[in-house]
Image: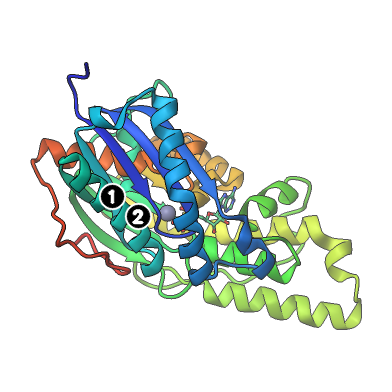
Amino acid sequence: MYKKPLILAIESSCDDTAAAVINGRKILSNCVANQKIHIAYGGVVPELASRAHQSKIIPVVQQALQQANINKKELTAIAYTQGPGLLGSLLVGSAFAKSLSLALNIPLIPINHIQGHLLVHFIEDERIQIPSFPFLGVILSGGHTQLVDVRDHFNMNILGTTLDDAIGEAFDKCGKRMGLPYPSGPQIDKLAEKGNPHKFIFPISKLSNYNVSYSGVKTAFINFISNSEQKNPDFIKNNLVDLCASLQYTLVRIILNKIELVARDKSLTEIVIGGGVAANTEIRKQLQDMVMKEDWKLSLPPLEYTTDNAAMIGITAYYKILKKEYGSLKDSSNARLKFN
Ligand code: KG4
Ligand code: ZN
């Protein structure tokens, strides 16, 4: 018998089909099925993503219930990602969650994916030290790059955002130009270990406010490769690790400059990172160096809570339950869902 809420959480906003079971703030299972089908296309194909969610969602939910050793009749609520994300992908998760909530006669909780990325820091886990409000939330993912003033679990204000590409998108698109498979962020991270980050210099965008831009560096990188290949067709092969290290250095520097500026200006010196790119070795190291030098505080999520997962949807739902905020069958998925 469980005293705290026992929630089944579903995440299907992009190309990962994920399900988790959470009891209170404790994760009982956290299962993800990656969709390998997109590798052949060098990026996510929305139509293929929704079809893959449809075939994977039932096995992933079954796996999550099994690993948690839970019978679905014991569940007290069902949470799902309402947005932002790809509409066709979101619809699969919401239709599944709605049907199951109807069948089991338990409440539904729609969740904002971005809030989920930040609230993983509230999961009960010995590796996680719960941050204290207010803090500077930084979302670094394939779809978003945002600096957020977090006053409370659901009182969040965006201070800065990318004006064009997200940081993960820049990693992936530049990686694609180098012939690396999608998503290339993790591969660039690995290859960069052996490279010289100062071998090639790429532009670091300097916007006067708290926003960032990644399209300039992406275009400069792609043009540089094309020009270099005209002189030497083996340019990428001969310089791969240095290209990865120099690109990674630049992409990381752009966001680090902004984090430092916002933290200082807004006196938000507790920094909490979320999203897939939070797995990047260089950004983790640079952030640790920065907070050590400034005597600030840093929370980095354990790796399994960086890229898209359903545990983040579950923990956010737990705080919604504490506020008695439930959804209904009428809620519609929203590809551009905002939280403020
Ligand atoms: O949060 P996430 O799983 O999905 C979105 O909500 O977008 O983030 C996926 C992004 C991809 O762009 C992927 O290349 C990037 O996170 N990523 C990384 C690393 N691991 C994942 N980027 C750089 N270094 C990594 N180690
Ligand atoms: Zn995400």
Q: Is residue 21 above or below residue 200?
A: above
Name the residue: 65% across, 70% down.
41
Q: Residue furthest front?
A: 103
Q: Position of residue 139 (x, y in %)?
A: 39, 54
Q: Is residue 280 above or below residue 250?
A: above
Q: Taking 256 as reference, is 211 above or below it?
A: below
- Image quarter of residue 207: bottom left
Q: For this rendering, which residue is in front, 64 or 321?
A: 64
Amino acid residing under circle 1: Ala
What mark, if any, has residue 93 been given in the picture?
2
For the residues bearing labels 2 and 1, Cβ distance under 8 angstroms:
yes
Identify the residue at horizontal 36%, vertical 66% (top origin): 161
| Frontmost residue, 14 versus 120 | 14
Q: State the CA–CA distance, disc 2 to disc 1.
A: 6 Å
**Can residue 181 be seen by looking at this rendering?**
yes
Q: Is residue 115 left or right of residue 66?
A: left
Q: Is residue 86 visible?
A: no
Number of other residues with Cα within 10 Å of mark 1, as a class: few under 14, some 14 to 19, many 20 or more: many
Q: Residues within 10 Å of mark 2 (few under 14, many from 20)?
A: many
Per the image, the residue denoted by label 1 is: 97
Question: Relative to the observer, which residue lies in front, 76 or 85?
Answer: 76
Q: Secondary structure at mark 2?
A: helix
Q: Tell me the number on the disc at residue 60.
A: none
Locate residue 179: give its quadrant. bottom right
The three-letter amino acid code for the residue at tag 2 is Gly
Q: Is residue 192 left or right of residue 302?
A: right
